Amino acid sequence: MDKASLFVQVANMEERLGELYMELGSLKEKILQLIEENQRLQQENSRLLQQLQEDEPMGDSQSHHNLLRIYEEGFHVCHVNYGSLRTDGECLFCLSFLGKH
């Protein structure tokens, strides 16, 4: 292997490392965004749970209305994913539970 070929190989490697470094920076930014979103969702979930606990005992009609409101705000009310954000549109478990099937 001659010196020129070796130099080209090192230059190529350096270029790939630069690309990997940029990709790593992009992934780091995405991870930070996910951490921030997760923290925001945990705070919202805590707020909703606290709101449910603070509500006075109510009749079935009022409970159903509150669950429907929470669902319409974009959160699950079914036993499978209760309190988590609905990201894939409608949830058949929630709709069944709310009697909207």
Image: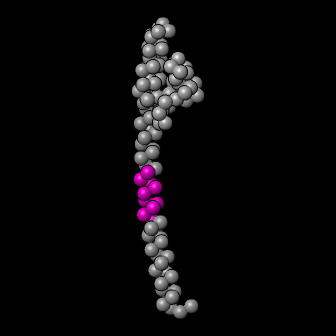
Residue segment shown in magenta: 21-30
Q: Where is 28 relative to 18, above or below?
A: above
Q: Position of residue 63 (x, y in %)?
A: 47, 13
Q: Where is 42 relative to 52, above or below?
A: below
| Marker count (numbered) | 0
Which residue is depicted at the point 47% across and 66% down?
20
- Using the rendered image of the protein, determine whether residue 50 is visible from the camera's viewpoint: no
Q: Where is 57 relative to 83, above or below?
A: above
Asked whether 46 or 87 is in front, the reply is: 87
- Quarter occupied by residue 48: top left
Q: Position of residue 51 (x, y in %)?
A: 43, 20
Residue extending farthest to the front is: 101
Asked whether 77 or 40 is in front, the reply is: 77
Q: Position of residue 87 (x, y in %)?
A: 47, 36
Q: Position of residue 15 (x, y in %)?
A: 45, 74
- Using the rendered image of the protein, determine whether residue 92 is visible from the camera's viewpoint: yes
Which residue is depicted at the point 49% across and 76% down?
13
Which residue is depicted at the point 42% across and 47% down?
33
| Residue 42 included in the magenta stretch of the image | no
